[in-house]
Structures are given as structure tokens and as C-alpha cells.
Image (cartoon, grey):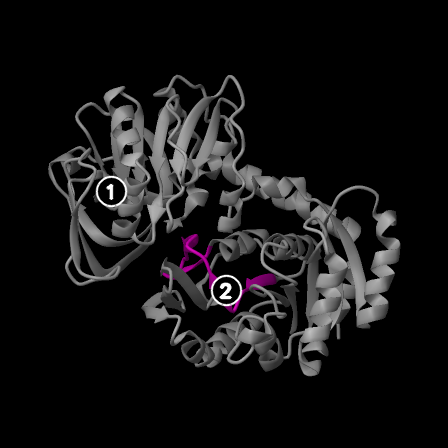
Amino acid sequence: MAALMLQGTGSDVGKSVLVAALCRALAQRGLTVLPFKPQNMSNNAAVTADGGEIGRAQALQAIACRAEPHSDMNPVLLKPQADRTSQLIVHGRVRGTLGSGNFREARGALINEVLQSYHRLRSQCDIVIVEGAGSPAEINLRMGDIANMGFARAAHVPVVLIGDIDRGGVIASIVGTRAVIDPQDAAMVRGFLINKFRGDPALFDDGYRAIEQRTGWRGLGVIPWLRAAARLPSEDAVILERPADPREGRRIIACPILPRISNFDDLDPLKLEPGVEVVMVPPGRPIPAEAAMIILPGSKATIADLAALRAEGWDIDIRAHHRRGSIIVGLCGGYQMLGRRIADPLGIEGAAAEVEGLGLLDVETTLSPAKVLRPVRGRALGAAVEGYEMHMGETGGGAAARPFALLDDGRSDGAVNRDGNVMGTYLHGLFASARLRRALLARIGVAGGGRDYAADVDAALDEIAAEFSAHADLGALLRIAGVGA
């Protein structure tokens, strides 16, 4: 069975997107392909068919492979919940928390479980495409590494290194990686790809040859800026650092960027609607007064993020919008914040605490160690929806008698206030429903919901696969991976 690992010279060089592009390109050639990432650190996650959770990027890569997402595709997931603490997910299930003091030791002890997942996947397909994390040049993290060369060497998987030319210094980043990594690690690298190129690639010919000469690695292609990637679900919080200016004539949907924001890709389907502009509000800025809707996003640390929201003065903005009759929607942790009280008696998110919520919904939440992970279907706002639940805690109260959604399994979800302009839900992924988007946007006077989001994502995957295939040496990549060997 064949395998290939894409690593990067740094974070945000486009590894996740290129893995998705390669997966779709190989699936289109008739190969059975599965994605794999040994270790991921992200608060954007998806629920799998086997009842676990994995990084959102691996769920998208599974779609690119035309496969069902499975917890083996991302056996170790770290979800940051404080500056030095992360929730540890192994094989899709919560195993506890890791602090900076025990991170390396605990991480290194997981290599056998990582290899178990990898070998299970490898037995089910023609080829596994593996994504690294961060960069192998972070040699200070090499001991106990399971994300990059530690995995590649343990599993005997050849590596292709990705450099990002858009950020500048791509020659130094690739040559520098070759210079600092261990010779045995360097021997795992069989070639490199240049990513995010704009303009005439012939202008980079001399630089391309210089990298080959200085590293001894083969160049495998210069990939252009993949514009269709903007239509794919957001995976990396780096994208939140790039706020866009609202365009005229659009109604604004505002979402504050909380310190531990999670699953912010929930908002991606709204970004494709021509009548609205989704504005991610960074710290230090008020929620726009002209916003027609505010969405409070999911959070990995609800109580801490609620404190941060208040420190920014966003609670004042939200109450002002509420008095003006604006629509306010809380998703998961955002739903918990809208209630009257949040209690964490067992210290699930940190020190045991009990705090007042924003008081816009008559509900209360008690956090608990049991994590709810399940796909759901039902109806909300008169529209059929499907998504998934991923939360710790139970919420109830008077407003829950007016649920946001009625689920097919007989349960109800969420709550709506008496005026119908404040609503909360535990459902992730519900905005992918065109009918629900239409019903929600109608409340702010926008005609929407005309696009099939899943079909649009699938078309974007086809587009990035076509671009990748046109500019990368697919034959060489397959030979490196061992296809046909």
C-alpha cells in the first residue's frame, strides 16, 4: 500500500488545501484515497460517523476523497482552551488535558496509537495522503515528535515539503529547512512544491533551480494561488487575522472573534450569500452599529470567553442591538453565553466557577465532563437541517419550551425568546441548509439561500484538484508514494 506525506516550511503554507487537492485529483483517477493527520491543533472540529471528532480539515479532506470522515483520520487532536492548556482528543474521544509542562512527554507516548490508526487506514485504500503540522524545521520540538518527521520515520512514509512563495523568502525557508533538520530526517524528503504563486512562473525558474541545487531535492511543481480554496470551509484561525472591509449594499452579520473561538467555519455558508457581509470583529473594535444580525460563535472555554467579551465591551454592543430589535444567534458556547447563568462546578474549563450570562435567554447551563458528539437531523425555522452536536454541558430553562429545533430522534434543541429575535442552538453546520439560510436571512430583509453549499464545496474541490494537477508532477508524486511499486 502507498503513502505520501506533505509537510510545510511553516504554518499556513497551504498544507491542508494541497492535501485536499491531491486527494481529489487521485480519487478522480480512480484510486481509493484516504487522508491522515497524526496530530492536529485546532478548535475547528467535525463529528465522525463512528461518534468521534477530528480536525475540520481532515473532514474536508475525507470529502475530497469521497470517503466518510472517521476518527482514525486524525488520531490526536489538541483543542486549546487556555494559553498553556489544551484538551486532548485521542481516537475521537476526550482523554484529558495537556499543559505546556507535560506536552512533549505525553505526545511522544501517543506514537503507537497514531500508528495503529494509520495502519488501519492504509489497509482500506490504495494510498494514504498524510498532512504534517507546523514545520519540521522546529527542531526544538523534534524530540517526541509525532506530527512531522517523527511520524514519517516511524511509518516509513516519504515526504514532500511545501514552501509558500506568497509570504516571501521561500528559497530561504526551504533551503533553511534542509540545513537545520537532522540528516536522517532530510533523507525522508523526496522533493518540494512551491505554493501560492502569482504571476508568470517562468520568473521563478532561477530560484527553483537554486533550491534544487542547494537541497538536493527535486522540484515537483509551482502551484498557483488557488482562488477556489476561498470557498472551502475555514480550518485555520489565521484566516481570522485578515478582516475584510464590508461592501456597500449588503446587510452586515457580525461575529466577535473570541480568544477561544471554535468551529467558526459554521459561518462559511453565510459568506457565500450575495446579500450579506459576514464581518469578523477583532478585539479592540466595537460590533458595527449597523449590523442586522450578531452571531455569537462556539467557544472552547465559554466562561473565559464570556469574560473576554465583557472586557471588550461587546456585551454593551449586544444589548444595544437587542434593544433595537436586531437578530442575535448563539451557537453552542455562544448559546450558553446568552443565558442567565453558566456553572462549572467540576472545573471542566479551569477553576470551578459560576457566572452570570448575558441574560437574553431564560436558560441556564451546567458544564459536565461528558462530551456530546452526535450527528443530528431535524427542522428549525420551518426548514429541514442536518449538522452535529459537539458540547460539554446541559442547558435548560423557561425559554427551552420554545426550542430552536425539533430533531428527528424526538429531542428538542436550543431556545428562542418570546419576541423571536434571540435564539440559541447546540447545532453546528446548520447554515449549510439553503432553506434555513433563506428563513434566517428573511428576518433581516435579505433574499438568500439560493446556493447549495455542499455542492459548492464539492465544485471548489474539483477546481483546486484541476489546478493542482495542471501544475504539479502527479506522476512523480505517485512514484514517490509507491503507487504501482
Badge 1, how many Cα within 10 Å: few under 14, some, many 20+?
many
Q: Judge by depth and name the residue closer to the eye, 113 or 208.
A: 208
Q: Judge by depth and name the residue closer to the eye, 118 or 126.
A: 118
Residue 464 appears anywhere in the view: yes
Residue at 78%, 51% (x, y): give it.
Answer: 471
Q: Residue furthest left?
A: 398
Q: Is residue 15 above or below residue 421?
A: below
Specify the amino acid type for callout 2: Met
- Indicate left or right for 407 with 173 as reference: left
Specify the amino acid type for callout 1: Met
Where is residue 76 drawn, in percent x and y?
A: 44, 68
Residue 7 magenta: no
- Magenta range is 33-55
Residue at 17%, 63% (x, y): give it.
Answer: 346
Residue at 36%, 37% (x, y): give it.
Answer: 385
- Indicate left or right for 482 with 329 as reference: right
Q: Is residue 318 above or below residue 217?
A: above
Q: Judge by depth and name the residue closer to the eye, 48 or 175.
A: 175
Where is residue 335 drawn, in percent x and y?
A: 26, 41
Q: Earlier in the sequence, mark 2 or mark 1?
A: 2
Where is residue 432 drawn, in percent x and y?
A: 44, 37
Q: Secondary structure at mark 2?
A: helix
Q: Secondary structure at mark 1?
A: helix
Where is residue 404 drawn, in percent x and y?
A: 25, 35
Badge 2, how many Cα within 10 Å: few under 14, some, many 20+?
many
Residue 233 appears anywhere in the view: no
Residue at label 1? 337
Dividing the image into 4 quarters, which one contains the N terminus?
A: bottom right
Residue at 19%, 29% (x, y): give it.
Answer: 417
Residue at label 2? 73
Dividing the image into 4 quarters, which one contains the C terminus?
A: bottom right
Q: Quadrant of residue 484?
A: bottom right
